[in-house]
Image: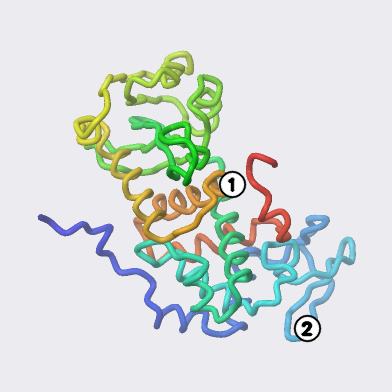
Amino acid sequence: MPMNRVQFQPGLSMREFLNLYGTDELCEAALIARRWPRGFECPRCGVCEARTSFERQGRRYWQCAGCQYQCSALSGTIFESSKLPLTSWFLAMQLLTQSKTNVSALELKRHLGVCYRTAWLVKHKILEGMRLAEADRQLTGRVEIDDAYLGGERSGGKAGRGSENKVPFVAAVQTTEDGLPHLACLSPRPFTNKAMEEFLARHTALPLTLVSDGLNCFQVASSAGAVHDREITGGGKASVLNDKFKAVNTLIGNAKTALTGTYHAIKFAKYAYRYLAEVQFRFNRRYDLRAILSDLLVALVRTPRSPQHDIRVAELHR
């Protein structure tokens, strides 16, 4: 079997990571470069000129020449008000982007040397940045789509699709001309016509050839202007092994294996959207593992300040 060049590519080694981000000064310089690549820009009024800059408690601050607002590179971002040093944040980002499998909050706790609640919050703030970065992802061309569920039966609860812990989600994969997976989109939502219309409107663009099984809600693809390649597969192993859906079935299988193999107690009903966003973020940037941490840093400096209360609010209550 030939070597998968994407899977076996060199990533950002820990030695290289420490050379690039081993001190708070290096981390802050990297953060400034990603947030203001063309120089300071006031986050309050947008003026691209600083009247002065100064240091306070080891952190560099700027004062806007327009509105006199004083801020650091962390102000207004997901890093604001954090008591953790930037080196801890960057180490968490390194672990979450370079690991072959997912990294649980418990494992993150041990690597960072913090309590579990802090590790959980850091992880979910980073996942929130990933979610916002992928929120408007659009697929085009040939797209395989399928329905799937996260979670399992609770003790004493309903079994099968009626289980209270099962979260329905749509998985879609844009493929190359030779059928190889290229980009993906994972979205928790019910399998209704309205929900599918919303998914197609937000996450696909014409020209579009949608390859699906016989689930009724996928038929709205035709009214959305897409070419609908519909094949009724039935259930069982044969449907999973169908080459027509190889890309999307592989993605679903890998996502479920990564989640169930890492997390032993996960609130899918509350946080599935964020865990799926992590899978999507990493999948769509898998071609260059060395650059994925830099991409994540760009996403995080664009993510607004997120207090713990906001992070713990379920998506369905937003």
289 relative to 146, above or below: below
At 47% from the left and 36% from the top, the residue drawn is 158
Left or right of 83, for residue 169: left
Report crowding for label 2: few under 14, some 14 to 19, many 20 or more residues within 10 A (C-alpha): few
- Residue 301 percent across, percent down from the top left: 64, 61
At 40% from the left and 36% from the top, the residue drawn is 148
Kindly identify the amino acid type of the residue bearing the numbered disc 1: Lys
193 relative to 47, above or below: above
- Which secondary structure, mark 1? helix
Mark 2–mark 1 CB contact (< 8 Å): no
130 relative to 61, above or below: above
Number of numbered tags placed on the structure image: 2
Q: Nearer the viewer, residue 309 or 85?
A: 309
- Residue 38 percent across, percent down from the top left: 64, 63
Q: Nearer the viewer, residue 39 or 289?
A: 289
Kindly identify the amino acid type of the residue bearing the numbered disc 2: Glu
At 40% from the left and 42% from the top, the residue drawn is 184
Left or right of 213, for residue 107: right
Q: Nearer the viewer, residue 256 or 248?
A: 256
Left or right of 171, for residue 121: right
Residue on which the image places disc 1: 270
Real-space Cα separation, disc 2 to disc 1, in angstroms:
41 Å
Rendering quarter of residue 48: bottom right
- Which secondary structure, mark 2? strand
At 49% from the left and 79% from the top, the residue drawn is 20
Q: Residue furthest left?
A: 1
Q: Who comes first in sequence, dot 2 or dot 1? A: 2
Answer whether residue 239 is visible to the viewer in this image. Answer: yes
Left or right of 282, for residue 195: right
Residue on which the image places disc 2: 55
How is the model colour-coded? rainbow
